[in-house]
Amino acid sequence: MSPITRRILQALLYEGIAIAVVGPALSLVFDEPQSSTFGLAVVLSTIALAWNYVFNWIFERWESRQAVRGRSLARRLAHGAGFEGGLVVILLPVMSLWLEISVAAAFVANLGLLVFFFFYAIAFTWAFDRVFGLPASAAKQDPGAVNA
């Protein structure tokens, strides 16, 4: 699978599952109608979809320059932390405006989502790699191969 196709498929699957989980969860937590929280989940996921593509492109460029190949637990944790850290900075103002709460209150309200998505991102990426294989940037090289 080409790197672009892989990133698009990964992002679409990730966000589709996220919308299915987050929409109802937001409705319960904020005691809002599902129509409103589903809309918020779609907006958040659309933003996250774009960030997912950009972040994975950046991460894979960095990863391809590393001497050690493969995706260790430490590398997966770094990936999850980097993705979620960047996303929270982007999404806090959106949540604050949509829910008409302060940015600080949006941060507190978002903590549960941050914890969920941190572990979800790691688990999803692991499962995706198991089903579709590692990207070229993380594939282990044959020790007998000559690097060009």
Image (tube, rainbow, N blue to C red):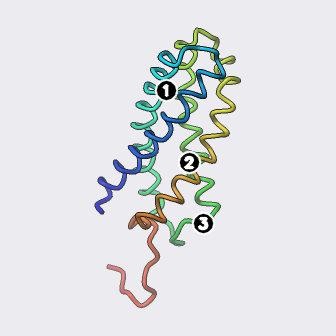
What's the amino acid at mark 1? Ala
Give the number of the disc on residue 86: none
Where, quadrant-wise, is the C terminus in this rendering?
bottom left
Q: Quadrant of residue 33?
A: top right
Q: Nearer the viewer, mark 3 or mark 1?
A: 1
Q: Where does label 3 land, which residue?
A: 72
Give the number of the disc on residue 121: 2
Where, quadrant-wise, is the N terminus in this rendering?
bottom left
Q: Secondary structure at mark 2?
A: helix
Q: Where does label 1 land, which residue?
A: 41
Q: Position of residue 97 (x, y in %)?
A: 53, 12
| Cα gap from disc 1 to disc 2, whole angstroms | 16 Å
CB atoms of marks 3 and 2 within 8 Å: no
97 versus 57 height, above or below: above
Q: Nearer the viewer, mark 3 or mark 2?
A: 2
The residue closer to the viewer here, 36 or 50, is 36
Residue 12 lies left or right of residue 74; in this view the side is left
| Cα gap from disc 3 to disc 1, whole angstroms | 31 Å
CB atoms of marks 1 and 2 within 8 Å: no
Q: Secondary structure at mark 3?
A: loop
Q: Position of residue 72 (x, y in %)?
A: 60, 66
104 versus 82 height, above or below: above
Q: Secondary structure at mark 1?
A: helix
Residue 31 lies left or right of residue 12; in this view the side is right
Residue 73 lies left or right of residue 63; in this view the side is right
| Cα gap from disc 3 to disc 2, whole angstroms | 15 Å
Q: Nearer the viewer, mark 1 or mark 2?
A: 1
